[in-house]
Image (cartoon, grey):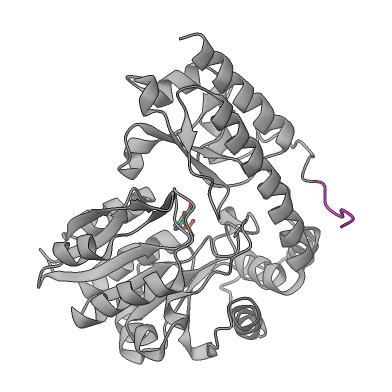
Amino acid sequence: MSKRYDFDKVIDRQDSDSLKWGKYCGQDVIPMWVADMDFASAPPIIDALYKRIEHEVFGYALPPEDLSNIIIQWCAEHYNWAIRPDWIVWLPGLVPALHVMCRAFGQSGDEVITFTPVYPPFLSAPKLSNLQLVRCPLTMEDSQYTFDLDAFRSRITPRTKVLLLCNPHNPVGAVFPPDKLESLARICIENNILICSDEIHCDLILEDIRHRPTASISEEIAAHTVTLMSPAKTFNLPGLNCGFAITPNPDLRHCFSTARAGIVPHVNALGYIACLTAYRDCEPWRQELLAYLRSNRDLIVKTVKETPGLSMIAPAATYLAWIDVQAMNLPDPMAFFEQAGVGLQDGSEFDGPGYVRLNFGCPQSRLKEGLHRIRSALAKI
Ligand SMILES: Cc1ncc(COP(=O)(O)O)c(C=O)c1O
């Protein structure tokens, strides 16, 4: 495949408005923490944004006319999932949607269950809504992360109202198989538990497997599910704030929309344009990105294998590596790696102490330097 896009290009983000880079401003630390990538956006998105800016007026925005249809087409082509325009609720981000789910469907003291370790807002959203968080630790099957249905069932009580499901999973990078999802959903339906299926990483599958949206498994499951999707991770647009929830159930949609009203802001004009252009025009860019991420992922897996004291399961999706550093007995792993010149995210934030999360969405030269620093620092212990 001839290459059209230059993912090797090193862009200086130090003096930009980057959260990821600002944390280590003026320090010799390579930021490999928060989940955005160090790549330029796809050229069609940049062109579309310029065109929109040339209009010079930035009033309250409506979704572009074609946007729902483009998303419908994307879901049909990539996931064989037939959705309808009225099922879509626009969102400026998916984290607010996790909170809205808790507020819409739980009352003080009710329980929200999730599989741990997990993306930190899954852990904090229930608490901030006066709900109880119930953790169900992920398990291993055939050397892959998965969830245990008996363990899940055993944690359910009459007060369990919502499952916050992350698939593909951040931070472990697992893509859960449809049969397992179906069994999980069945338990939820039997126990009147609504499923919030956060699928923000679904367009970033690195293995030759297909993502299956939970709600696409059956109409009955769809009726109990709110799916969250967004172009933000895949097309590197998290600063433009555009995502959406999908639910065919009008009652769920009504409760979700009511809990959101007046609190969650509208999507902005640039976010809508970027979202439309990403799904309409950027599939070739995404395909090249996936090839690049695969090669970065393979490099990390190889390096980790060759580094005494480190281990990991190769992520099947995402640009995040979940690395087990327990064997090194580091009192503060994140501080240790920062000292070595690499900014990682501490596993304890995800309810996974003894692990670190490394973001490999960056030019390979930067990744190699980061891995070199990690190896050198560990070799000195
Ligand atoms: C599973 C998951 N959900 C949501 C988000 C963030 O979504 P947003 O920036 O749209 O709020 C992330 C970011 O990494 C994520 O991994």
Above or below, comparing residue 155 to residue 328 in the picture: below
Figure quadrant of residue 72: bottom right
| Name of the residue lying farthest toward the right | 2
Q: Between residues 326 and 215, which one lies in front from this camera angle?
A: 326
> Magenta stretch: dominant SS?
loop
Q: Is residue 271 above or below residue 355?
A: below
Does residue 363 appear to the left or right of 34 in the view shown?
Answer: right
Note whether residue 131 is visible: yes
Query: Residue 215, image x and y in percent?
Result: 43, 80
22 is within the stretch colored magenta: no
What segment is highlighted magenta in the picture? 1-6
**Percent coordinates x, y for residue 317 in the rendering:** 55, 55
Residue at 30% x, 43% y: name it: 351
The quadrant in which residue 158 appears is bottom left
Question: Residue pushed farthest top?
Answer: 380
Q: Quadrant of the N terminus?
A: bottom right
Residue 123 in the image: x percent, y percent? 28, 52
Give me the residue at 47% from left, 86% from top: 87
Res 282 visible: no
